[in-house]
Image (spheres, grey):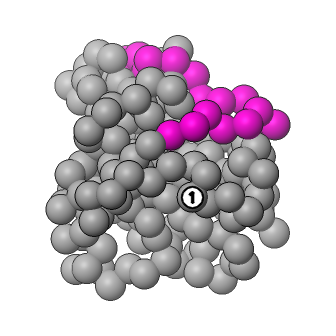
Amino acid sequence: MAIIEFGGEKVTTYGSLPSLDEKAPHFELINQELSIVNLEDFKGKRLIMNIFPSIDTGVCAKSVRNFSNKAAELENVSVLCISRDLPFAQQRFTKSENLENIVNLSDFRERNFGKDYGVEMIDGPWEGLLSRAVLVLNENGHVIYSEQVSNIDNEPDYLAALKTLL
């Protein structure tokens, strides 16, 4: 489990992020068309997994915008923006911001992703939502970068994540 900070309070996550060089756990998430998407759907792609509590918060929205803009310049990279927001909220945000370089995915239905990836907050005011974290996977689905943001009010380290893809 990880201990992070939110609004000056300590918050605990369900577990820990997958380790470097580890194969990322299988997931099944819901896309904007309400279809199931899993890790195998991205086989052969390099992935930035931008994980956050809610698209309707300023820092989360900013992370989606930043990864969308920065990853547009990279080859064979998909940015997965993962939260427990309903797909309708994710789609509304994407359309209002004219973002095309991201794939919004939701853990609202089965709620396994947060546990399997160690990012579900198990206490604090946002209990049940996903913490802010970034994983980068290589073409084989192995973790090459991992960041559990220690204070949920802060943005992830975009440059550190992107450097692993250069």
Bin the neighbour count of mark 1 within 10 Å (Cα to Cα): few under 14, some 14-19, many 20 and up: few
Image height of 93 relative to 9, above or below: below
Place residue 131 in its image quadrant: top left
Label 1 sits on residue: 41
The answer to whether 11 appears left or right of 85 in the picture is: right
Image height of 85 relative to 119, above or below: below
Image height of 132 relative to 128, above or below: below
Does residue 25 belong to the magenta stretch? yes
Q: Which residue is at a point 51% across and 26% down the rendered structure image?
A: 116
The answer to whether 164 appears left or right of 116 in the picture is: right
* Type of amino acid at the residue the image marks with label 1: Asp
In this rendering, does residue 154 appear at all? no
Q: Which residue is at a point 57% across and 58% down the rendered structure image?
A: 41
Q: Report the front residue among 68 and 4.
A: 68
Quadrant (top left/top right/bottom left/bottom right) for the C terminus:
bottom right
| Secondary structure state at the residue bearing disc 1 | helix
Q: What predominant SS class does the magenta segment belong to?
A: loop
Residues rendered magenta in the picture:
10-27
x then y, percent, for residue 71: 60, 73
In this rendering, does residue 87 appear at all? yes
x then y, percent, for residue 102: 46, 70
Image height of 99 relative to 149, above or below: below
